Image (cartoon, rainbow, N blue to C red):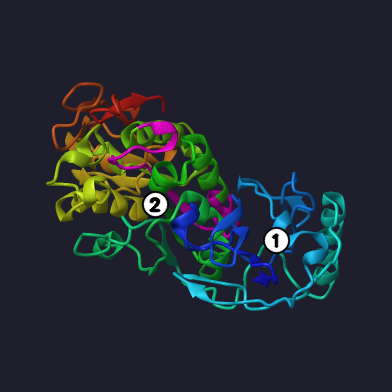
């Protein structure tokens, strides 16, 4: 925190009051009482080099330079009257504290206390030069410590209050039965946006997951981004794609989740359901960027238009239904369990008798002289990207029948017979997001 004798400060916004979550740095220029003047969109974790440029005229604007690049702003104000140019002569102090699961950087490497304002170009050059100097001294920028990274497989949750089990009896991840052992760490934070998940990645999942640890990281979706923060579905998707790239750089498998039905209105005055369905369509269209696309919204109880109003499956949440009840959480957990147990995949599963599909199955090779059935998983719990495509290759002489559960269909039929010496492939599909409910459709092998 950089303070001045005029009651303004350079600092960090950690809480939701000004559209930020609790787990990433968002530089601000603000009143010492916490009221913001200039607020950035940027979420940061790890080491960074910043220069604050409060306005030097009454008609100017504040600027914040981060690692040589100007920030993007939620609000770009004018701090001239209280913190302009030569007025910045007070003692500089730095505060450090922990909020939620995010720990503020404890070490201040260097400070400038200029009495005249830099231009934007000068600030960009200064921060780049300082990064180069500190890099040569061993400081790694944009990357947190690796001290606590684990070599054992990790199952990480990076989500919201839904993933904290708010207003339910347990956290969803605690109800998952894993087919392979892993250490569970739940980084879910109430009110967290998808931008905070991306910005705080270095300070949370990165500190936990080592490259080569066969770990899986789950992203709980943008419900707070679209109803609260004011992001568009397109912006929320970009946040999650940034999060995804960071996770893949750590060698982790990624699970991205669709957004559940939600009450109240959000960005642009649109309803939560409209925003959810628009985002979900974008996520599914870009699904192959991720290792698994978890689609709890495929369950009509969680994702159909107006599902939030059914108090069997959603809490009332003071008039803005958001969180599943215990009954609603059952479907959420089914989908989550399928994702964690299916994301690593089994490239080939040989069978010669009746079989029940596993989420990890990708290619089932059937061989037998007699006929038998393969019972499918619930299509609502399958991955809604390429990982959810199931192929059955019948190399035997008997007919093998793919049989859905829960009255689901394959191309409208109750089952699909796969003749000898043929291959058939299917994948899950929701025909109408407003009514939800997945079925299976045939696709090319």
Q: Position of residue 326 (x, y in %)?
A: 16, 56
Residue at 56% across, 65% down: 206
Which mark, residue 64? Answer: none
Relative placement, left or right, of 215 versus 324 is right
- Quickly name the residue at label 1: 82
- Please name whichever residue, 332 or 368, is drawn nearer the observer in this view of the structure: 332
Residue at 55% across, 70% down: 207
Q: CA distance from mark 2 to mark 1?
A: 41 Å
Look at the image and say whether residue 340 sits in the magenta stretch. Answer: no
- Determine whether the residue tagged by mark 2 lies in a helix, strand or loop: loop
Image quadrant in which you'd find residue 337 = bottom left
- Please name whichever residue, 253 or 321, is drawn nearer the observer in this view of the structure: 321
Image quadrant in which you'd find residue 87 = bottom right
Which mark, residue 220? Answer: 2
Q: Position of residue 30 (x, y in %)?
A: 61, 60
- Determine whether the residue tagged by mark 1 lies in a helix, strand or loop: helix
Residue at 86% across, 62% down: 116
Vertical comparison of 22 with 302: above or below: below
Look at the image and say whether residue 252 sits in the magenta stretch. Answer: yes
Q: Nearer the viewer, mark 2 or mark 1?
A: 1
Task: Quadrant for the C terminus, please.
Answer: top left
Residue at 52% across, 50% down: 195
> Which residues make up the magenta segment?
243-270
Q: Position of residue 227 (x, y in %)?
A: 39, 43
Task: Quadrant for the N terminus, please.
Answer: bottom right
């Amino acid at each position: 925190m950089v303070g001045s004798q005029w009651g303004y400060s350079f600092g960090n916004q950690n809480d939701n009051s000004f559209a930020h979550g609790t787990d990433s740095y968002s530089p601000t220029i603000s009143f010492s009482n916490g009221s913001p003047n200039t607020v950035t969109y940027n979420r940061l974790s790890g080491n960074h080099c910043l220069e604050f440029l409060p306005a030097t005229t009454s008609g100017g604007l504040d600027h914040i330079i981060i690692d040589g690049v100007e920030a993007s702003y939620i609000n770009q104000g004018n701090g001239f009257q209280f913190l302009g140019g030569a007025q910045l002569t007070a003692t500089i102090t730095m505060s450090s504290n922990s909020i939620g699961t995010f720990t503020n950087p404890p070490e201040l490497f260097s400070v400038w206390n200029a009495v005249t304002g830099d231009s934007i170009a000068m600030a960009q050059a200064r921060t780049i030069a300082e990064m180069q100097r500190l890099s040569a001294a061993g400081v790694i920028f944009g990357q947190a410590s690796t001290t606590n990274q684990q070599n054992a497989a990790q199952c990480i949750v990076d989500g919201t209050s839904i993933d904290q089990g708010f207003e339910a009896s347990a956290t969803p991840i605690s109800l998952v039965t894993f087919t392979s052992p892993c250490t569970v760490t739940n980084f879910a934070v109430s009110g967290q946006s998808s931008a905070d998940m991306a910005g705080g990645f270095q300070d949370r999942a990165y500190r936990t997951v080592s490259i080569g640890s066969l770990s899986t990281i789950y992203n709980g979706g943008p419900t707070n981004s679209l109803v609260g923060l004011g992001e568009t579905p397109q912006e929320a998707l970009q946040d999650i794609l940034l999060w995804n790239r960071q996770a893949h750089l750590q060698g982790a498998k990624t699970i991205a989740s669709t957004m559940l039905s939600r009450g109240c209105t959000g960005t642009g005055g649109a309803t939560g359901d409209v925003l959810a369905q628009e985002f979900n369509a974008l996520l599914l269209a870009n699904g192959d960027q991720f290792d698994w696309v978890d689609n709890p919204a495929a369950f009509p109880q969680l994702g159909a238009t107006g599902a939030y109003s059914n108090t069997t499956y959603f809490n009332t949440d003071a008039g803005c239904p958001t969180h599943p009840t215990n009954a609603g959480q059952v479907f959420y957990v089914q989908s989550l369990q399928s994702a964690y147990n299916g994301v690593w995949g089994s490239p080939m599963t040989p069978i010669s008798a009746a079989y029940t599909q596993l989420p990890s199955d990708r290619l089932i090779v059937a061989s037998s002289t007699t006929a038998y059935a393969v019972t499918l998983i619930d299509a609502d719990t399958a991955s809604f990207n390429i990982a959810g495509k199931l192929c059955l290759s019948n190399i035997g002489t008997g007919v093998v029948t793919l049989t859905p559960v829960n009255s689901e269909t394959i191309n409208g039929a109750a089952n699909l017979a796969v003749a000898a010496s043929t291959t058939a492939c299917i994948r899950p599909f929701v025909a109408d997001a407003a009514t939800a409910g997945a079925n299976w459709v045939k696709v090319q092998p």
